Image (cartoon, grey):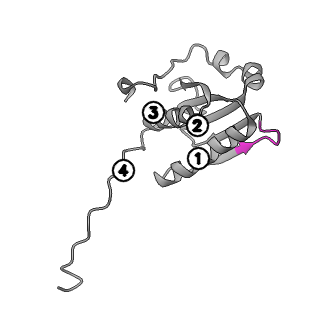
Amino acid sequence: MTDATRTKPDAPTLPNYDDARTFAVLVARMLADDKLEDVVIIDLRGLTGVADFFVVGTGTAERQMRASLEHLRLHAKTINRRALSIADSESGVWLLADFVDVVVHLFGRDQRAYYDLDGLWGDAPRIPWDTAAAD
């Protein structure tokens, strides 16, 4: 058999993560699996040009938040999603990963209450992510 007649095995099929909503749901589930609390997806489509979705979660410890952000970064890379930037405060009380259409905010409990993204975007719809119906 020549090289020209050989067939390549089919590449594994990855889910379509080009869709921002699908990616936001994946992120929310990953954060919840990493034991972040009060994870919400805020739908910003039509409200701002900043992003389509914010995914917000509360960490119970700086180490947990950093590990979750690294877990997310590594997994996103495997599905051809790369963060435009990752912001990490030295104190680890607000971590951010900007995937352009999806921006992930990880807060400590006090910082989440202080910055109150949930209240700032209180009129924005929330996307359900924790049930099979959310798919």
Mark closest to the chain's N terminus, 1 or 3 = 3
Camera-near label (3 vs 2) is: 2
Is residue 73 positioned above or below 8 on the image?
Answer: above
Q: Which residue is mark 2?
A: 34
Cα gap from disc 4 to disc 3, whole angstroms: 16 Å
Camera-near label (1 vs 3) is: 1
Asked whether the residues under the numbered discs 1 and 2 touch, taking CB atoms below 8 Å apart as contact, a structural biologist would say yes
Mark closest to the chain's N terminus, 4 or 2 = 4
Task: Read off the magenta span.
Answer: 87-92
The type of residue carrying mark 4 is Leu
Camera-near label (1 vs 2) is: 2
Q: What kind of element bears circle 3?
A: helix
Residue 57 position in % (x across, y down): 62, 29
Q: Is residue 19 left or right of residue 32?
A: left
Q: Is residue 44 left or right of residue 95?
A: left
Q: Which residue is mark 4?
A: 14
Q: What kind of element bears circle 1?
A: helix
Q: Which residue is mark 1?
A: 71
The type of residue carrying mark 1 is His
Camera-near label (4 vs 3) is: 4
